[in-house]
Image (cartoon, rainbow, N blue to C red):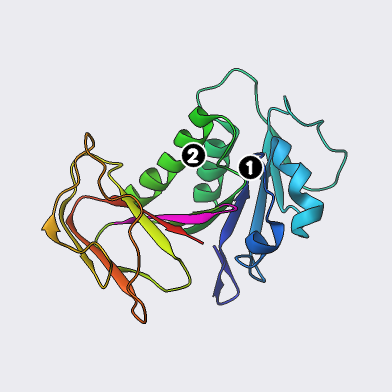
């Protein structure tokens, strides 16, 4: 979505626990558009960002009495509150997304939210998940980099069988390799001292997790 000549990013806030608010706030930028999902509203004050849109079935947070645009969802539905928020943001023209408060706690919710990154990558959108420990994004096509600020990083096969995976300037390099779902050997790599590691995928996509 454009605000004047500025392409705005959509930040979607879920209800999973956040402990390191200071770290998460470092990722927030002026001009971001904030969608809070149900109990994600508990993060409003510590994040210091007011919602632009609220969505949810309000099974885990009382429906707020506010003038902010609010979409009340049915409790019986195919989409989670987070997925609905993404679809609503896409309707409004957003092409870049940041997710916070969407990992940790229930594994089913965490995995479902991580796979939103795959959905957005298929649509050609840019997206990242940030939590207390890491940042996650899909690598497909464009080369991704990992600086020394991240002591560890992992590559996870998240979508079929990516091919031609190349890792450079890391403790465990790869050259046009594959990482099968049944053998996730790309966990806990390290950037070489004084270097900036890179990850590239010739075909398919892979999940890159940078560990702070």
Horizontal and vertical percent position of residue 204 = 21, 50
Q: Quadrant of residue 142?
A: bottom left
Other-residue count near label 2 (Cα within 10 Å), few / some / many at <14 / 14–19 / ≥20: many
Q: Tell me the quadrant of the picture where the N terminus can be found.
A: bottom right
Horizontal and vertical percent position of residue 35 = 65, 49
Q: What's the magenta bit mostly, secondary-structure-wise?
A: strand
SS at circle 1? loop
Q: Is residue 49 left or right of residue 189?
A: right
Q: Quadrant of residue 65?
A: top right
The one of 61 and 66 positioned closer to us in this rendering:
61
How far is mark 1 from mark 2, CA to CA? 10 Å
Q: Is residue 104 left or right of residue 138?
A: right
Q: Which residues are magenta?
A: 131-139
Is residue 134 located in the magenta-colored stretch of the structure? yes
Q: Is residue 114 left or right of residue 188?
A: right
Other-residue count near label 1 (Cα within 10 Å), few / some / many at <14 / 14–19 / ≥20: many
The one of 125 and 178 positioned closer to us in this rendering:
178
Q: Are marks 1 and 2 in contact (CB under 8 Å)?
A: yes
Which residue appears farthest toward the top when viewing the image?
76
The disc placed on residue 113 is 2
The disc placed on residue 185 is none
Is residue 116 located in the magenta-colored stretch of the structure? no
Which residue appears farthest toward the right when viewing the image?
65
The one of 71 and 35 positioned closer to us in this rendering:
35
Instruction: From the image, tell me which residue sits under label 1.
Output: 14
């Amino acid at each position: 979505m454009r605000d004047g000549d500025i392409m705005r990013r959509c930040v979607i806030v879920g209800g999973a626990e956040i402990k390191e608010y200071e770290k998460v706030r470092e990722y927030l930028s002026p001009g971001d558009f904030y969608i809070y999902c149900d109990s994600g509203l508990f993060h409003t004050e510590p994040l210091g960002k007011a919602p632009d849109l609220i969505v949810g079935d309000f099974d885990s947070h009382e429906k707020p009495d506010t003038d902010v645009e609010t979409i009340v969802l049915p409790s019986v539905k195919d989409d989670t509150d987070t997925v609905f928020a993404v679809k609503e943001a896409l309707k409004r023209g957003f092409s870049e997304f940041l997710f916070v408060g969407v990992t940790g706690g229930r594994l089913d919710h965490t995995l479902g939210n991580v796979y939103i990154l795959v959905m957005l990558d298929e649509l050609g959108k840019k997206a990242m998940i940030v939590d207390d420990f890491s940042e996650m994004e899909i690598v497909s096509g464009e080369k991704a980099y990992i600086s020394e600020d991240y002591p560890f990083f992992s590559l996870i096969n998240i979508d079929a069988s990516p091919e031609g995976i190349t890792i450079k300037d890391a403790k465990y390099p790869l050259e046009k390799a594959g990482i099968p779902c049944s053998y996730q050997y790309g966990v806990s790599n390290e950037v070489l001292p004084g270097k900036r590691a890179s990850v590239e995928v010739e075909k398919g996509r892979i999940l890159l997790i940078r560990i702070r």
